[in-house]
Amino acid sequence: MTMQESAALFTEKSGQEMLLTLARTLEDRLEWKPEPTSRSALDLVRECSVHCDEWAQLLGLFTWPEQFKTRVGSITTREEAVAEMSAAVGRLVDAIRAVPDEQLETILKAPWDEAPIGFWLTYAGGHNQYHIGQMNYIQTLYGDLDMDF
């Protein structure tokens, strides 16, 4: 299995896991926050769908763009979240699979770090996993302890 295929499968699985976690979130809890400055489960899916789109753009350019073209905050319902996250992960998975082998060692300088493109292939999937953990924790904060992992 190639590095690209492995990263694509990891990213695809992270998107599926996020949507499964969202599916376990009660309708009246999608925007629930323990504090006004906290984030909701839907906020986290919004961020991850945008992030996946940004990384799809990034991997197509092999350089950090001046400004990402995103649609921050466009998700307002569960149905939109499922559609947007699924589409964004699909675009990212396609971009990961399209990275030529000869580009894997190309150094990409992000605003906070630099590493070969091969390293960055799993970055968005890891970002999704991080926020899945937050979504699960949010569920425990409002008393839903019946999570089936």
Image (spheres, grey):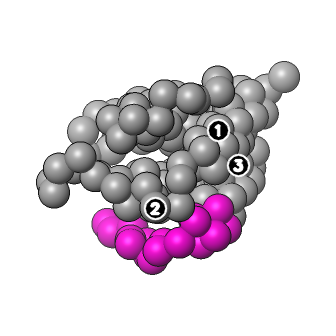
**In this picture, which residue range is highlighted in magenta?**
63-83
The residue that disc 2 covers is: 28
102 horizontally vs 128: left or right: right
Labels 3 and 1: the sequence-earlier one: 1
Between residues 20 and 85, which one lies in front from this camera angle?
20
Residue at image coords 60%, 45%: 24
Labels 1 and 2: the sequence-earlier one: 1
* Amino acid type shown at disc 1: Glu
- Residue 81 painted magenta: yes
Total numbered circles: 3
Residue at image coords 48%, 28%: 145
Residue 47 location, x and y as percent?
41, 56
The residue that disc 3 covers is: 93
* Amino acid type shown at disc 3: Val
Residue at image coords 64%, 24%: 149
Residue at image coords 56%, 29%: 146
116 horizontally vs 2: left or right: left
State the quadrant of the N terminus.
Answer: top right
Q: Is residue 62 placed above or below 137 in the rendered structure?
A: below
The residue that disc 1 covers is: 17
Label 2, secondary structure: give it. Answer: helix
Q: Foreground mark, 3 or 1?
A: 1
Labels 2 and 3: the sequence-earlier one: 2
Between residues 12 and 138, which one lies in front from this camera angle?
138
* Amino acid type shown at disc 2: Asp
The residue sitting at the right extreme is 1
Disc 2 to disc 3, C-alpha distance: 31 Å
| Dots 1, 2 in contact, CB < 8 A | no
